[in-house]
Amino acid sequence: MNNAPNSSLEARLNQLETSHRALEGRYRRMKLALGLAVSPVLLGGLLAASGWMNPGLAAAEVAAKRFSLVGDDGKELAAMELTSDGLPSVTLRDKSGGIKARFAVASNGLANVWMFGEEGKVRAQFGFDSKGPAMWLFDKEGTGRLVAGFSEGELPGMWLDDKEGQPVSRWVQNASGFASLAMLGTGGLRQSVLGLDDENRPMLWLYDERGVGRAILGFTLYGNPGLWLDDPQKKTRASLAMGVTGDCSFDLLDASGTSRATLSGEEGKEQLTLRNKSGETLFTTVK
């Protein structure tokens, strides 16, 4: 047997297998790449402890910094080792040597699984971030396109990004337990939101290019539909709503929120009312 300190472990295992061919029919050959020089005496001790030299005995413990599983051509197909942070990881490869999956403990002490595509880039990740369990999906260029996980307060949500990695849509649950779907524009600013408000009323919010809310289509506290239009300072300047009796009213408001003009009434009983800045009626006409 070659006693050179730097001789390959695989060569020494081949010599041992030749000496113990009677065991080939019962035990699967395992080739360990320890990444360091192992003396024949130590190697023999490891094999003896693992039951190779005495199949009737089972090892109580086998310790190493790296384990490797190779194919018939000698190429590594799987490896169990320590990362640069000294944390455990398992890597799986295809026959060409490309990484297909990796399972490891991240630097935050939490486990993660990475799945790789044909291009050798990560296509999916399952694990934990600072807010809890999450799932990440990537395109073939390796750009993150979807995240499903938890936001602040452990509220579930899903976030979609474009091919440049810029956010385009968000589907989240608010503190009241109601879900909302947001469409985002340049810089991740909200452009529209469809969901339920804190009173469990369905609503559609529309925003300008600065992300300022400008219109709301939804329901009043009495369960009747309405439309509210706001100025750039977020003050409501116009509203169209249905009353409890089914009549409709259209209001124009000033910057202080005072209704200055109202058109209301049922069919055949329309009424127009004009007011001053104090809200006092200046003019009323009834058809």
Image (cartoon, grey):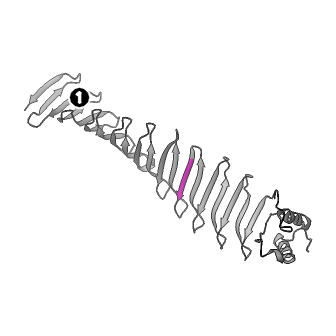
Q: Quadrant of residue 3?
A: bottom right
Which stretch appears magenta? 133-139
Where residue 145 sits in the image (x, y, percent)?
50, 56
Q: Is residue 284 above or below residue 90?
A: above
Relative horizontal placement of residue 56, taking residue 93 as reference (left or right): right
Give 10 or 123, whichever is nearer the viewer. Answer: 10
Question: Residue at point 15% right, 29% down?
Answer: 273
Q: Main secondary structure of the magenta part?
A: strand
Question: Residue at point 39% right, 35% down?
Answer: 198
- Report the residue marked by disc 1: 259
Relative horizontal placement of residue 263, taking residue 96 as reference (left or right): left
Where residue 247 sits in the image (x, y, percent)?
17, 35
Question: Residue at point 54% right, 63% down?
Answer: 141
Relative horizontal placement of residue 180, taking residue 153 as reference (left or right): left
Q: Is residue 128 magenta?
A: no
* Residue 221 visible in the picture: yes
